[in-house]
């Protein structure tokens, strides 16, 4: 029995996913748990594993297409079903023989044991566009092709021949429409002549010199030699990230609290841990542990705003903002309050490596309840971060720098760190956020309570 392969939901707010690459070719065997295809979302590109073993069949979505969550994109059939389907195809010698005259008896469309009608992806798209049922089409070969659909339309339609919709990925179709490009005029690199997003981008790049030479209303008035700006293509993940953060900024009432803390004892703690065997512990690892402990004491900062009210999260799952070439992603350290420092460091190293290699798994980015964004390694003293929905808060961490501060009434040079807490005012008010930040500051300045 065939099992549908569907576009998975990798996030609560995800509506579509981009199928970037099939890792198994149609007709090839696949085992349960093995990577089957790659999906790019607004957060990350992940490998999706097969849920069952069998043979990949009935692929209806090509690489590069945006697909709604839950829509079938292929099927996995048993080896017996795949073998039966193969036997319905003519042997290689017959396929290479001269074409015979068509038989007067109609040949039924090739079907799998599951009852699916076998047709090429392009044939299916043309049939859907023109409202034709595949079951009504007589194929010339082992499955319905574009020629079969067009022949059926020409034979059974009383109206003028249908206008063939140029095959294209949804993203390519959308961007071409936004830029005023005619898909029929573009070079196509996709299967069955489909226009992909890279074809649209190449066409836009080729049009840039012509745009630069075109006169503008300002020509000769301000600076006629001003160069035309270069348009940098962006990934789907970056575009969706920008859209989500814009919506978040408009919908979420932010407020910010800043606290400067002394890190002398935190630094001593890290120096002690670095001397031990095991993974190299960073300040981020220590902060994850201390933040998780503070969140357990202040559950209102470990919550989310919903239409029904404020949802308090049982687990403390701390996300770490990681910058990549394509986007900003937040892998999550699950149950961070229950893990020791070395276990946190080990998981953090693995997550960051997978994030930078574009190999995060769905579970790596799900369930975050709080986020830490650390720019200290870039020499940043302090900054304000945007809350990562649906979370209630995010902690922005600057660099540790020597500053002159009063100690017992006397000036002293101490290693200081600036923390900035961004909060969703619908979930937590200033007093609650200040109490959380005070608890965190005390843990940083006296971290003995967090020792393994």
Image (cartoon, rainbow, N blue to C red):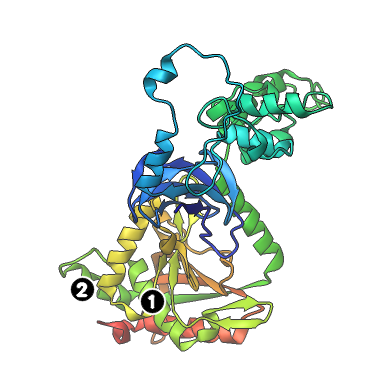
Eyeballing the image, is 226 above or below 380? above
Q: Quadrant of the C terminus?
A: bottom left
Measured in 3D between alpha carbons, the distance from the residue under mark 2 to the one under mark 1, in whole angstroms, is 24 Å
Residue 78 in the image, given as x and y percentages of width and height: 38, 49
Residue drawn at (37%, 18%), measured in percent from left and top?
93
Asked whether 45 or 68 is in front, the reply is 68
Eyeballing the image, is 327 above or below 121? below
Q: What residue would you read off at disc 2? A: 272
Asked whether 221 or 369 is in front, the reply is 369
Residue 3 in the image, given as x and y percentages of width and height: 46, 54
Q: What residue would you read off at disc 1? A: 335
Give the image quarter of residue 417: bottom left
Circle 1 sits in a helix, a strand or a loop, which is it? loop
Eyeballing the image, is 122 above or below 335? above
**Residue furthest out toward the top:** 98
CB within 8 Å, label 2 to label 1: no
In the rendered view, does 196 fall on the left or right side of 336? right
Eyeballing the image, is 45 above or below 10? above
In the rendered view, does 298 fall on the left or right side of 71? left
Give the image quarter of residue 264: bottom left
Give the image quarter of residue 125: top right
Density class for disc 1 (Cα within 10 Å; few <14, some 14-19, many ≥20) is some
Residue drawn at (34%, 73%), measured in percent from left and top?
286
Asked whether 155 or 420 is in front, the reply is 155
């Amino acid at each position: 029995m065939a099992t549908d392969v569907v576009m998975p939901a990798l996030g609560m707010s995800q509506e579509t996913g981009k199928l970037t690459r099939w890792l198994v070719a149609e007709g090839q065997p696949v085992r349960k748990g093995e990577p089957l295809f790659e999906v790019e979302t607004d957060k990350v590109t992940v490998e999706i594993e097969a849920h069952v073993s069998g043979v990949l069949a009935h692929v209806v979505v090509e690489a590069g297409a945006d697909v709604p969550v839950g829509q079938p994109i292929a099927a996995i059939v048993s080896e017996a079903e795949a073998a039966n389907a193969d036997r319905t195809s003519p042997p290689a010698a017959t396929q290479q023989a001269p074409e015979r005259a068509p038989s007067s008896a109609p040949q039924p469309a090739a079907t799998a044991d599951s009852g699916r009608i076998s047709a090429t992806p392009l044939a299916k798209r043309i049939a859907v566009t023109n409202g034709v049922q595949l079951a009504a089409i007589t194929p010339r070969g082992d499955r319905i092709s574009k020629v079969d659909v067009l022949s059926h339309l020409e034979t059974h339609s009383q109206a003028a021949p249908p206008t063939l919709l140029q095959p294209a990925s949804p993203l390519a179709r959308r961007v071409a429409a936004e830029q005023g490009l005619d898909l029929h005029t573009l070079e196509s690199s996709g299967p069955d002549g489909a226009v992909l997003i890279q074809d649209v981008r190449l066409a836009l790049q080729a049009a840039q010199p012509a745009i630069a030479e075109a006169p503008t209303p300002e020509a000769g008035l301000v600076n006629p030699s001003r160069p035309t700006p270069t348009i940098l293509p962006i990934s789907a993940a970056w575009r969706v990230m920008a859209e989500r953060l814009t919506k978040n900024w408009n919908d979420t009432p932010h407020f910010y609290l800043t606290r400067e803390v002394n890190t002398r004892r935190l630094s001593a703690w890290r120096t002690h841990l670095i001397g031990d065997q095991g993974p190299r512990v960073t300040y981020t690892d220590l902060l994850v542990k201390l933040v998780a402990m503070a969140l357990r004491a202040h559950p209102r900062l470990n919550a989310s705003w919903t239409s029904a009210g404020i949802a308090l999260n049982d687990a403390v799952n701390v996300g770490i903002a990681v910058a990549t070439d394509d986007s900003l992603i937040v892998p999550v350290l699950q149950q961070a309050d229950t893990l020791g420092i070395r276990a946190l460091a080990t998981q953090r190293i693995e997550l960051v490596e997978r994030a930078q290699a574009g190999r995060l798994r769905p579970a790596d980015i799900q369930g975050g309840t709080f986020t830490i964004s650390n720019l200290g390694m870039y020499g940043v003293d302090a900054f304000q971060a945007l809350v990562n929905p649906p979370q209630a808060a995010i902690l922005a961490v600057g660099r540790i720098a020597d500053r002159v501060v009063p100690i017992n009434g006397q000036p002293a040079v101490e290693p200081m760190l600036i923390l900035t807490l961004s909060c969703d005012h619908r979930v937590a008010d200033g007093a609650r956020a200040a109490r959380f930040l005070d608890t965190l500051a005390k843990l940083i300045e006296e971290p003995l309570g967090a020792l393994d």
